[in-house]
Image (cartoon, grey):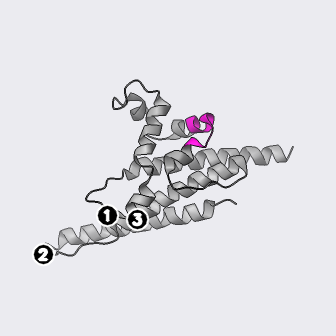
Amino acid sequence: MRCQSQAEGFFNAYELLTKNNQAYMEQEASEKNSTSIRQTFKTDIVCLAFALELFLKDLYFVVNGVPLSGHKIHKLFDQLTEEIQEEIFQHHPENYFITACFMYPGKSPLDKFKSKIRHYGDGFVKWRYSHEHLALFYETSFVVGLIQSITKVTSRICTEKRKNSNL
């Protein structure tokens, strides 16, 4: 079964929490003596990471007609055909920078992209249990771009399937 609406819900929650966090930080900056700690800073990342997982699972279902399980993004991504992986990469807003990246010498642009996905691939699990880690980093702009790329590919495939079923 498709999980697009769930994915969109978690992405919307991420956006709302991010706006809330930004407003809170602006308020904190204006109140010089404030010492409170904001607890929703981790929640937005959990929502974003779970949205990514669900968007990937939705794409897989659209392509294959069967659900996919698991939480590790790189393993879910590897279940897609190389053609779809490449299309997602081509739609990603950072694809030029990833292609030019020197961090992964000798790798193809798609392999560099996959390495970056691997780096953020267990965000949902890690950030749910962020209290168990001393420090975590999550590049939200990369993940948002990945979600945008996945939704473009999903939309294209759905449109193709609708056209083919009307023939």
Q: Nearer the viewer, residue 51 or 111?
A: 111
Disc nearer the start of the sequence (1/2): 2
- The answer to whether marks 2 and 3 mark residues whose Cβ atoms lie closer than 8 Å is no
Residue placed furthest toward the top? 106
Relative to 83, residue 117 above or below: below
Label 1 to label 3: alpha-carbon separation: 9 Å
Q: Position of residue 140 (x, y in %)?
A: 39, 53
Q: Nearer the viewer, residue 92 or 122?
A: 122
Q: Quadrant of the C terminus?
A: top right
Residue under the point 69% across and 46% down? 63
The residue labelled by disc 2 is: 33
Quarter-of-image position of residue 57: bottom right
Which three-letter amino acid code belongs to the residue tagged 2? Asn
Label 1 to label 2: alpha-carbon separation: 29 Å
Q: Alpha-carbon neighbours of circle 2 within 10 Å: few (<14), some, or many (≥20)? A: few
Please name which of the two marks, 1 or 2, marks the residue nearer to the observer.
1
The residue labelled by disc 1 is: 132
Q: In the rendered structure, does residue 50 fall within the stretch colored magenta?
A: no
Residue placed furthest toward the left? 33
Can the viewer see residue 157? yes
**Span highlighted in magenta in the image:** 78-87
Q: Position of residue 44 (x, y in %)?
A: 40, 64
Q: Is residue 94 left or right of residue 5?
A: left
Element carrying mark 2: loop
Circle on res. 128: 3
